[in-house]
Image (spheres, rainbow, N blue to C red):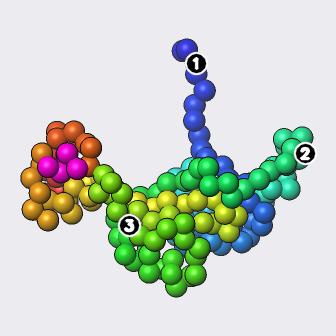
Amino acid sequence: MKNKPRFIAPLLVVENMERARTFYSNVLELEVIQDFGENISFEGNFSLHLRSHFQQLIGGLDVKTGGNDGEIYFEFDDLESLDKRLKSMQVEYVHPLREQPWRQRVVRFYDPDHHIIEVGESFPCIFKRLEKDGLPYNEIARVTLMPVDYVESCLKKEK
């Protein structure tokens, strides 16, 4: 298809815009780039839409949240400082900071409307951490399920 649809941004529906805006601004330190009242966009093309307005736009259909059936994903390489901030703000965790089977460290938590937020370290950060632990490139590739040439190129950029 020559003229196909272009993905623009994920949008989450929220009950209270000010509460949600404050959460994303304070917890993830995102900056609002557009504010239309019932709809706001943050840097990185992520948007929130007020439930009452969104519900009108979809003909009054019910809008449910908190189903644990999806998440929005962010990367941040200083997970310890983020985890400390989450704890100080008494954010509700899905699970604490932990390592995934492919060796990426992540933390998952809920926003005020019970959407799951995942924050994980980037793969170049994982590779650097594993190299510091003494793993050779081929072993880093094996445990992270990434191609060796990708591991090598990321680690060579870091040097």
Secondary structure, magenta segment, majority class: helix
Q: CA distance from mark 2 to mark 3?
A: 40 Å
Q: Confirm whether residue 157 shows in the render.
A: no
Q: Which residue is the site of mark 1?
A: 3
- Dot 2 or dot 3: first in sequence order is 2
How many numbered badges does the structure rendering display?
3
Disc number for residue 98: 3
Judge from the rendering whether residue 150 lies leftward or rightward of residue 27; answer left or right: left
Q: Position of residue 77 (x, y in %)?
A: 34, 65
The type of residue carrying mark 3 is: Arg
Location of the N terminus by quadrant is top right
Write the residue at 57% across / 31% down: 6
Q: Position of residue 3 (x, y in %)?
A: 58, 18
The type of residue carrying mark 1 is: Asn
* Front position among marks 3 and 1: 3
Disc number for residue 60: 2
Please say if 2 is above or below 13. above
Secondary structure state at the residue bearing disc 1: loop
Write the residue at 54% across / 66% down: 94
Q: CA distance from mark 1 to mark 2?
A: 32 Å
Q: Which residues are magenta?
A: 139-143
Q: Position of residue 84 (x, y in %)?
A: 44, 81
- Dot 3 or dot 1: first in sequence order is 1
Badge 2 vs badge 3, beta-carbon distance below 8 Å: no
* Front position among marks 1 and 2: 2
